Each structure stands twice: as C-alpha cells, then as structure tokens.
Image (cartoon, rainbow, N blue to C red):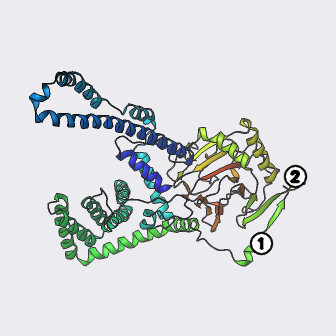
Amino acid sequence: LSLYLLYIMKNAFNSRGFVFLLVSPNSFFFLGHMTDLINTEKDLVVSLKDYIKAEESKLEQIKKWAEKLDQLTATATKDPEGFLGHPVNAFKLMKRLNTEWGELESLVLKDMSDGFISNMTIQRQFFPNDEDQTGAAKALLRLQDTYNLDTDTLSRGNLPGVKHKSFLTAEDCFELGKIAYTEADYYHTELWMEQALKQLDEGEVSSADKVYILDYLSYAVYQQGDLGKAMALTRRLLELDPEHQRANGNMKYFEYIMAKEKEANKSSTDSEEQQEKETEVKKKDYLPERRKYEMLCRGEGLKMTPRRQKRLFCRYYDGNRNPRYILGPVKQEDEWDKPRIVRFLDIISDEEIETVKELAKPRLSRATVHDPETGKLTTAHYRVSKSAWLSGYESPVVSRINTRIQDLTGLDVSTAEELQVANYGVGGQYEPHFDFARKDEPDAFKELGTGNRIATWLFYMSDVSAGGATVFPEVGASVWPRKGTAVFWYNLFPSGEGDYSTRHAACPVLVGNKWVSNKWLHERGQEFRRPCTLSELE
C-alpha cells in the first residue's frame, strides 16, 4: 500500500489529464479516506476508457471515409476528363467538396473529451498538492528507517504480510530522492538516487536520466563529507555529458577542496577530530531511546527473564466482583510487570467497532497533542495519525463502552476525556511520549479542571499486517495490536507522581491499517477509588 500510494501520488502530479482524490494537506493519510481515493481512481479510469472509445469511434469513421475516397480519387486521377464526363460523378464531386468535406472537418474538430474533462473538473478540488506528495514520501522513508529496510527491498515491494505486491520504478526512486533532497535529507537522497541508478544500470527502461541522477547523487554525497566518492560520481556524469556546466564547476571545486585538505595542518585536523568526537557524543546522547524504539518496533526488544515471565498470568476477571461481570467474567492477561500492563480479550465486539468507526469517520482530522506551554491542543510532526472524539451521549454504543471501562478499571469515567478514535495509515506513528503531564507542565490539562491523566485504556479495533506495535522504550515492552482486545495501565503512582516507565510510542504501520480508540482517565473522582499512598513511588 505504501508503494501504491506513492505511485498514484506521483502520477497525479506527472500526468496532465489523469488525477486522483486525496485528503487535504493538513490531514496526512489514513486508510478511511484512501479508500475514497481508490474509488475515484476507478471512476476516472472508466471515464478515460469512455473517452478512448469515443476517439476510436471517431477515428474509425474518418478512416472509412479516407479509404473510400482513396479508391475514388485513384480511379478519377487516371482519366479526369473521362471520369467527370459522367454527370453523376460531376454532381458527387461538387457535393463532396461543398458539403461532405465540411462535415468531415466538423468531425475532426469535434472534441470527444468533454465527459472526461467534466469529471476531472468535479474532482479537481480534492487533488493532492506538493505537501501531500512530500508527506507520502516521508512516510515511506520513516518506514525504511524504523524497520531497517534497504532500498532494494522497498523498491521491489518485498514487505511482510502484503497481499498486493507493488514495486518502484527507477523514476519513482528518483522522485523519492528528489523529495529527500529538497528537505536537505542527503542521507536518503543518496540511498534512493543510488537505487535509481542501480535499476537503470540493470537495464530498466525508464524516462529517468542518469545525468540528472548523478548530479543529485554527487552533491548529496559531498554534503555528507565523502569528497572522493563525490568526485568519482561527477567524473561518471562528465563521461555521459562532457559539457555539463554544473558538473564541470563542481569538479574544479572538489579538486580545490581536496588540495586544500591535503595542505591542512595537524592542528586543524586535531580540531576537526575533537569536533567529530563532540558530535558523536551528542549523537550518543540522543540515539539510545530512538534505537530502542526502532528495535522494539521490529520485535527486537528486551526479553523477559524466565523468572519474570513466571509472574505473568492470564485469568478470568470480574472487575473486583462487579455485578455485571460476576457471572460473565472477561478474559485478562498480563502483558508486562513493571509498569503493569494488562490486556483484556474479546472486550469489544466487531459490531461495536464498526459503529465507533462509522461515527468517527466523518470527523477524523489530524491528531493533536497537548502543548505543555499553552495547555492547548496542537498538531505535531511526531504524531502522524487522524483522530476524532466521541461523547457518550452521541450513541448507546459509546455510552456502553464508557461504562465497561469504568466497571473493569474501577475508575470514575465522568471526569475522563471523551473516547478518542485514531486511524494510523501509511507510516502513521506517535513517537515516544508520556500520557501524563510532568511537573514542568503545570498547565497541560488546566482547561479540563480534572487533574492529571491517571490511567490509559487503549482499544485495538483492527489487526495490523506488519508494524503498528505499542512500545515502551524505557522498559523494553512491545504490545502488538489484536483486534477486539484492549490494554490498560496506570500513568501515575497512587501518590500522584508520574510513572516515567510508562513512556510509550505507536510504531509506524508498515503494511495494513490500524484503528484504535483510547480513554484517558483523570485524577478527579478517583480519591476513594484509588486512594493516595504516603510513599512517592507507590
């Protein structure tokens, strides 16, 4: 699906008369709207075929007329006087030149594309823009990094769990490289320009030009500090196009820089080494969580010791003898011990899931996060999904779900936030974050007036073919989506202090479609349901 989306996005921009429906620029992609995109594409293909048939019918009429006249003129030109000596031939010549050629002219000039152009005009308001195409490309690059996929694997569409295999052409790879280049992402520029070059070298027929590819590639390599490779690529470019003005200028500049580097004294070298060490230290300071996050997303996380695993159980749970569940307890299993994460199985039915999704779809918009400085909701680059909020009074199903959460957690949901429904499409993710507000964010939930987020309840409303796990980098836990289940954990200790081990993330969806809904429960109303303790970390 990731590759298919990129394919249709590219064609939407590169084709003059063939375009596709996409969500608005600020929406980012989600599968609910992308099914509309598929239907729109189908509609446009039907319209295009009708146009082709009309043009073929028109050409067939012209062809028959031309064949008839070809035979007639061939006979007439052999003996013009004898041919025109027949009064009928003389009359028909006058008629053809005065009437029939005019009719043919009208047929040739007749525009058969009205229906297709009309259909395009109707859909034009939904066409993608540059930001949409860039977003699709970034999603693909995000998946590549998170799941450690090489460009050849992605290009050939060899992804786990795919039903409809798709591949990237050399031109597609070139487009991906160009988008990375415009974002000053020279690392991915190099990867995708090299892949485009490789496919062309293997004999792929493409409109992509090696000269253009080498031009981008050599500069991207130079920007990453590999001067020798940049010079080698520029030489190859000049073999293809000796008069290439920029390449000739770059080669002179590269040679100048190379000579200058050879003359550099040792002190400057030591200074550079020191700078590199400082940069490396900064990288090391930043990368550990990112590495753990990506490893957990790939299923390469920490493994529990057998001793810890023995403490995890599955059970039938009655909500501490809640009347609704004494005779019909629910299935519960432990996912992790510290922090304690439990999963409820078969806790939401397929019918309830469909109702929630149908209620949410019309109002899905770009998901937001709480701005710690203003306390208001805002979009963020690290959360790429679409979400909607559902109140209990809107539907008996939502009200029933809220009651179920209250019964099974023992917490008051009257002070909780509304049920949030989220859809993570191509590359959709939510990078590591806390659900609760830290001490340096005193105004995070001030407008709600219900205190901090004490706990999180998360429904999984779909299975995911590949990717899409909920991971906890601090402790090494990975919780994988299973349709009809829900996971629950406390964000705060009973003392009200935040549990920093609950820092978690939603991994990018590699293949498939991820639907979730969550309920954030707040402190107010829980005073007697979950009393405070004297110890800060209990």
Q: Residue at x 73, y 46 (%)?
A: 351
| Numbered circles on residues, count | 2
Which quadrant of the structure image shows residue 209? bottom left
Give the answer, above or below, for where 533 lies relative to 51: below
Q: Amino acid at mark 1?
A: Arg
Report which residue position mark 2 lands on.
322
From the image, tell me which residue sits under label 1. 311
Front one among 281 and 151: 151
In the rendered view, does 515 fall on the left or right side of 399?
A: left
Residue at the image point whose x is 34% and y is 42% from the top: 16
The quarter of the picture where the C terminus appears is bottom right
Dividing the picture into quarters, in which one does residue 75 lie?
Answer: top left
Q: Is residue 26 left or right of residue 472?
A: left
- Where's residue 377, x and y in %? 57, 43
Q: Nearer the viewer, residue 452 or 184?
A: 184
The answer to whether the residue labelled 2 contacts the one labelled 1, judged by CB atoms less than 8 Å apart, is: no
Q: Position of residue 102 (x, y in %)?
A: 23, 24
Q: Which mark is residue 237?
A: none
Foreground pick, 239 / 414: 239
Query: Sequence-wise, which precedes: disc 2 or disc 1?
Result: 1
Quarter where residue 481 is shown: bottom right
Residue 535 visible? yes
Name the side, left or right, on which 282 lies relative to 207.
right
Q: Secondary structure at mark 2?
A: loop
Image point (19%, 75%), residue name? 263
348 relative position to 374: left or right: right
- Structural crowding at the residue carrying mark 1, measured as other residues with C-alpha within 10 Å and reported as few (<14), some (14–19) or many (≥20): few
Q: Is residue 526 visible?
A: no
Residue nearest the viewer, comparing 372 with 79: 79
**Residue type at tag 2:** Asn
Work out how far the residue at label 2 is from the one at label 1, CA to CA, in angstroms: 25 Å
